[in-house]
Amino acid sequence: MFEVIPAIDILGGKCVRLKQGKYDAETVYFDNPVEAAKKWEAAGAKRIHVVDLDGARTGTPGNIEIIKNIIKEVKIPIQVGGGIRMFSLIQELISFGVDRVVLGTTAIKNPNLLEKVSETFGDQIAVAIDAKGKMAAAEGWMYVSKKDVVTLAKEAIDLGVNRFIYTDINRDGMLSGPNYEAVTAFAQEVKVPVIASGGVAKKEDIEKLKETGAEGVIVGKALYDGKVKLEEIL
């Protein structure tokens, strides 16, 4: 079943969207991200993707209490990413009720931790593969790895990872349409579940993504700007 997952990006305690991950290009949509979560749950979402943008940039989570409030207030599964680089924090989030923890920078810079958490938490761990061209980016997309995305993903699979979230940075927040070719190629290479992210602007984009081999898509700006209605794309 192809899954459409609304995104809630939190910066400075508010629900925002960035363009291409640029922190100086933010638009605030909700002063309280909990209200966004309730809205998407009421519209029929089966899962929500939450990103702590402060954490992604600094490596220190800045919105944990808000994330905990979201978990308290909605009944659907929540997956969380952004600045999660310590085993103790992963443990805390999962024990509090986070359904899936999404790791980015950790996968590039700390393979030992990635192996440990994959072994401990299994399906509750996913790795965010953020593509800048064919190379992998990290640290809120400010750092670009010397590894290409497929090499990085295959190394992660060897460490026990079995799900990826693939984002094309150049498409993110731009409403310019997903990079179908890149998603298809990546999904074919890794042969484990892939959730696509970045660029969705209309209902047809989601229909086309279903043909890429991805198991789902994360949608942000298109929902917040009303370009697509969640009820119509679930």
Image (tube, grey):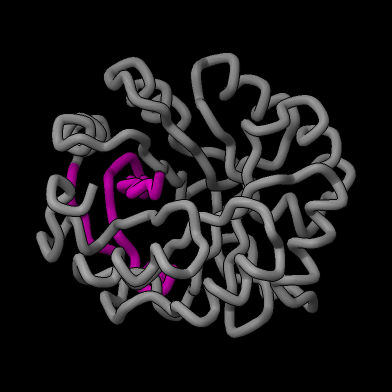
For the image, the number of numbered tags is 0
Is residue 101 found left or right of 48 in the rendered image? right
**Quadrant assignment, res 60:** top right
Which quadrant would the N terminus be assigned to in this image? top left
Q: Is residue 56 above or below residue 45?
A: below
Q: Please name the residue shown 59% across and 15% down the image.
A: 95
Q: Please name the residue shown 61% across and 66% down the image.
A: 187
Q: Give the image location of residue 102, x and y in percent.
A: 58, 43
Q: Is residue 23 magenta?
A: yes
Q: 219 or 3, which lies in front?
A: 3
Q: Give the image location of residue 121, x and y in percent.
A: 72, 27
Is residue 180 found left or right of 133 in the rendered image? left
Question: Would residue 13 be seen by someone viewing this image from the given angle?
Answer: yes
Q: Give the image location of residue 15, x and y in percent.
A: 27, 46
Question: Would residue 25 be seen by someone viewing this image from the given angle?
Answer: no
Q: Is residue 121 above or below residue 198?
A: above
Q: Please name the residue shown 79% across and 75% down the image.
A: 147
For the magenta stretch, what is the residue range? 1-30
Q: Is residue 116 magenta?
A: no
**Quadrant assignment, res 143:** bottom right
Q: Please name the residue shown 38% across and 46% down the image.
A: 3
Prevalent SS, magenta region = strand
Q: Give the image location of residue 104, x and y in percent.
A: 64, 54
